[in-house]
């Protein structure tokens, strides 16, 4: 919880924000308490839709692209080093003569970032707390060359951007799934957690597929998907796959679900995607997904679908197909069993 470090710095008086009316928070963790800030004019920038919605529901001013001007910009360190540097460059740009605060966990690379930043600026202060560090400095132009690069081609012409999932090129699990996609998939379906569009591009090649909804929570990834997929059959949705869509409306769902938040593996994310697929599918609908072999999805699949089978796989991945969702709480539909 990063604002715990900020709260501690404020409480102990090491950092004083009382004369800084306009604060921007760049991509904070959703569990932060905005009440720790001694100011009322707070803007939150968020790229990740569930977090965006969370801050919006709290009544905060939320945007995907904060422009300032601000007196203080607080950067929560993301895992991607290039994205982290890009956010620091953005922080300097939107807080001319203001203060930039960088805050992050050891596991997200705060020590390396501290070293990097100290090579470019003189810090006004720093503090260690809760398995991480927070430090701050006056905004200038020291990081102007670190601005986040625009989306650009990487391997085989795929367009990605630092910070998105598998930014260097196609993910091995998604490649395995693309190769095993059943030719029988037909009609209207969704790529849940579609990222920058790799799987959807292969789904478009299936002869009977007519329409694809690519649902993705990462705004930057979705922008890349728009550049990778120029096809009228694809609709892009910046949405939380757990909440998106009309129950009982789809013929098929394909997904390589997320499997970690930060550095911690978390099978509940994929399990939520499975339940969401069951919610979205028509009674005869089909889910096809890839997962790392060790991830425990079978129990959730069996609870959510009548038929489950392993289509393909190796020691690393399993490609799973599930048919006929058991979900019975779709509006207007009688209970099937
Ligand atoms: C394992 S990656 C797969 C990405 C893409 N399908 C591919 O093959 O490269 C999972 C994706 O799910 C997205 N994601 C995570 N949580 C999400 C949510 N609640 N709703 C929608 N997408 C989400 C992530 O941003 C990431 O792009």
Image (cartoon, helix red, strand yellow):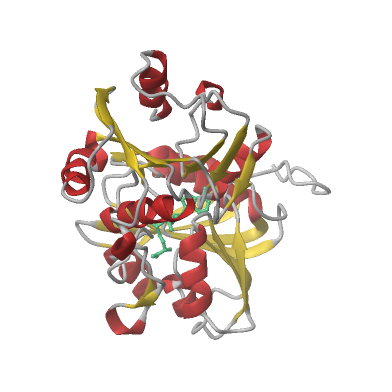
Report whether 38 appears left or right of 166.
right
Quadrant for ligand 1 reads bottom left
Point out the residue furthest to the top here.
Answer: 12
- Can you give x and y, in whole percent of width and height, for residue 42 in the image? 59, 36
Q: In which quarter of the view is residue 298 placed?
A: top left
- Can you give x and y, in whole percent of width and height, for residue 287 in the image? 52, 59
Seen at 52% across and 48% down, the residue is: 46
Relative to the observer, which residue lies in front, 146 or 72? Answer: 72
Seen at 16% across and 43% down, the residue is: 115
Q: Total label count?
A: 0
Q: Is residue 292 above or below residue 234?
A: above
Seen at 60% across and 54% down, the residue is: 239
- Can you give x and y, in whole percent of width and height, for residue 135 in the image? 29, 34
Q: Is residue 293 above or below residue 35?
A: below
Seen at 47% across and 62% down, the residue is: 220
- Can you give x and y, in whole percent of width and height, for residue 168 in the image? 27, 68
In the picture, the quarter occupied by the C terminus is top right
Relative to the observer, which residue lies in front, 281 or 123? Answer: 123
Point out the residue furthest to the right here.
Answer: 332
Relative to the observer, which residue lies in front, 34 or 221? Answer: 34
* Residue 197 in sight in this render: yes
In the picture, the quarter occupied by the N terminus is top left
* Residue 257 in sight in this render: no
Relative to the observer, which residue lies in front, 231 or 254? Answer: 231
């Amino acid at each position: 919880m990063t604002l715990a470090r900020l709260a501690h710095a404020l409480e102990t008086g090491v950092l004083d924000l009382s004369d800084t009316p306009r604060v921007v928070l760049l991509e904070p963790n959703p569990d932060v308490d905005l009440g720790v800030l001694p100011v009322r004019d707070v803007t939150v920038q968020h790229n990740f839709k569930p977090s965006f919605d969370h801050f919006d529901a709290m009544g905060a001013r939320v945007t995907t692209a904060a422009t300032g001007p601000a007196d203080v910009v607080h950067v929560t360190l993301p895992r991607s080093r290039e994205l982290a540097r890009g956010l620091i460059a953005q922080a300097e740009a939107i807080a001319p003569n203001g203060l930039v605060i960088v805050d992050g966990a050891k596991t997200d690379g705060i020590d390396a970032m501290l070293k990097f930043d100290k090579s470019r600026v003189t810090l006004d202060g720093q503090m260690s707390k809760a398995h991480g560090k927070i430090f701050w400095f006056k905004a200038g132009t020291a990081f102007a060359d670190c601005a986040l690069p625009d989306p650009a081609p990487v391997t085989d012409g795929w367009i990605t951007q630092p910070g998105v999932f598998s930014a260097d090129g196609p993910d091995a699990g998604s490649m395995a799934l693309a190769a095993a996609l059943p030719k029988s998939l037909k009609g209207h379906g969704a790529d849940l957690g579609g990222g920058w569009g790799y799987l959807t591009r292969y789904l478009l090649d299936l002869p009977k597929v007519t329409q694809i909804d690519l649902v993705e929570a990462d705004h930057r990834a979705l922008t890349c998907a728009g550049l990778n997929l120029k096809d009228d059959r694809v609709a892009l949705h910046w949405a939380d796959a757990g909440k998106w869509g009309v129950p009982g409306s789809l013929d098929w769902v394909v997904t390589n679900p997320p499997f970690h938040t930060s550095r911690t593996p978390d099978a509940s994310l994929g399990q939520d995607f499975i339940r969401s697929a069951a919610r979205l599918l028509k009674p005869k609908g089909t889910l096809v997904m890839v997962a790392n072999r060790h991830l425990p999805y079978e129990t959730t699949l069996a609870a959510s679908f009548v038929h489950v089978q392993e289509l393909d796989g190796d020691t690393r991945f399993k490609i799973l197909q599930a048919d006929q969702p058991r979900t019975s709480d779709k509006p207007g539909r009688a209970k099937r069993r």
